[in-house]
Image (spheres, helix red, strand yellow):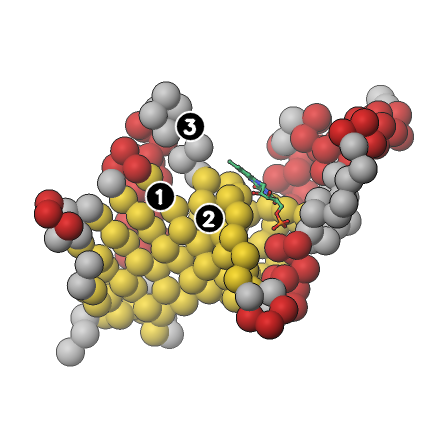
C-alpha cells in the first residue's frame, strides 16, 4: 500500500525549504522565491518564464501578473500550470503541477498596496507581452500614469492580479552522491496525498 500523507505535509516541507533558501542570503541566492512557470498555449505548445512566489499555504502557490500577458491569456484558456523551483546552493528542486485559479480581489488589492509606488505605476504602464515601439514609448506611458495618479494612491489595475496554483502534485528532488538523487512525489488524493519515491 502506498502511504497516505496529511494535506499539510508537502506544504510544510516546501515552506521549510523556502526558509532555508532565504537563509542562504542574497549573495549566493538572490531570488529565493523565483520559479519557472510553464503554461500551455494553442495547439498544446508549452511556454515558460520566471515569476516570483508571493504567498504559499495549504490552498496553493500564489504569483502576480498581468492577466492580458501571454501567460495570462494562456491560463485563461487552459488553467493547467507547472512550476519549478531550483535552489542551487541547497541542491534542491521542487516541481508543482496544478490548476491556476484567480485570487480574490481583496487579496490582490492588499498585495498590490504593499508594493513600491514605482512598481504600482509600472503595472498600469506596461501592456505586458504586447509589442513596444521603443523604450521612450514605455517612459512616456510611465509619465502619463504618474500624472494621472499624482498626489493620490495608485489603485490596482483591473488587468493585474494573482493566480493561485492549487497543486495536484508536488515533487521534491534532493541531489545525492553519484547521481543517486532522492525524489519524492506527492499526488493529491482527496483530503490527503499519496507519496511515492521515484527513480532519479
Ligand atoms: C527574476 C524574475 C522575476 C520575475 N517575476 C515576475 C513576476 O512575478 N510576474 C510577472 O508577471 N513577470 C515576472 N517576470 C517577467 C517574466 O519572466 C516574463 O518576462 C513576463 O511576465 C512576460 O511573460 P509572458 O509574455 O509569458 O506573459 C520576472 C522575471 C525575472 C527574470
Instruction: Name the residue carrying label 1.
Output: 86
- 134 or 151, nearer to the observer: 134
Q: Which mark is residue 30?
A: 3
**Cα distance, mark 2 to mark 3?**
15 Å
Q: Is residue 194 visible?
A: yes
Is the N terminus in the top left, top right, bottom left or bottom right quadrant? Answer: bottom left
Mark toward the start of the polypeptide (1 vs 3): 3
Residue 166 in view, yes or no? no
Give the labeled residue for mark 2: 36
The spot of residue 56 in percent (x, y) is: 45, 48
Q: Earlier in the sequence, mark 1 or mark 2?
A: 2
Q: Characterize the local packing of mark 2: few (<14), some (14-19) or many (20 or more) Cα atoms within 10 angstroms.
A: some
Mark 1–mark 2 distance (CA, rounded to whole Å): 9 Å
Residue at the image position 45 percent from the left and 45 percent from the top: 35
Q: CA distance from mark 1 to mark 3?
A: 12 Å
Tell me: 35 left or right of 198.
right
Give the SS element for disc 2: strand
Instruction: Specify the quadrant of the image occupied by residue 91.
Output: top left
Residue at 53%, 43% in the rendered image: 51
Q: Mark 1 vs ligand 1: CB under 8 Å?
A: no
Q: Quadrant of ligand 1?
A: top right
| Furthest-front residue in this view | 133
Q: Residues within 10 Å of mark 1 (few under 14, many from 20)?
A: some
Q: Is residue 165 above or below residue 112?
A: below
Where is residue 54 shown, x and y percent of the image?
Answer: 51, 42
Q: Position of residue 22 (x, y in %)?
A: 36, 31
Label pair 1/2, CB-CB below 8 angstroms: yes
Q: Residue at x 63, y 46 (%)?
A: 65
Under tag 1, what secondary structure?
A: strand
- Name the residue rendered at 53%, 62% in the picture: 46
Q: Give the numbered dot on residue 72.
A: none
Please rate how many residues cluster around mark 3, counting C-alpha atoms within 10 Å: few if below 14, some from 14 to 19, many from 20.
few
Amino acid at each position: 500500500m502506498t502511504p497516505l500523507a496529511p494535506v499539510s505535509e508537502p506544504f510544510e516541507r516546501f515552506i521549510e525549504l523556502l526558509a532555508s533558501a532565504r537563509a542562504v542570503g542574497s549573495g549566493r541566492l538572490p531570488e529565493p522565491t523565483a520559479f519557472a512557470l510553464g503554461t500551455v498555449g494553442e495547439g498544446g505548445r508549452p511556454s515558460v518564464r520566471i515569476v516570483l512566489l508571493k504567498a504559499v499555504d495549504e490552498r496553493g502557490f500564489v504569483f502576480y501578473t498581468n492577466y492580458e500577458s501571454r501567460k495570462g491569456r494562456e491560463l485563461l484558456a487552459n488553467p493547467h500550470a507547472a512550476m519549478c523551483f531550483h535552489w542551487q546552493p541547497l541542491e534542491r528542486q521542487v516541481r508543482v503541477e496544478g490548476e491556476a485559479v484567480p485570487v480574490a480581489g481583496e487579496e490582490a488589492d492588499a498585495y498590490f498596496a504593499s508594493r513600491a509606488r514605482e512598481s504600482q505605476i509600472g503595472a498600469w504602464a506596461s501592456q505586458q507581452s504586447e509589442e513596444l515601439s521603443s523604450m521612450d514609448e514605455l517612459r512616456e506611458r510611465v509619465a502619463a500614469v504618474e500624472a494621472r495618479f499624482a498626489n493620490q494612491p495608485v489603485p490596482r489595475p483591473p488587468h493585474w492580479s494573482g493566480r493561485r496554483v492549487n497543486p495536484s502534485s508536488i515533487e521534491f528532488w534532493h541531489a545525492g552522491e553519484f547521481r543517486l538523487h532522492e525524489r519524492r512525489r506527492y499526488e493529491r488524493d482527496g483530503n490527503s496525498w499519496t507519496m511515492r519515491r521515484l527513480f532519479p
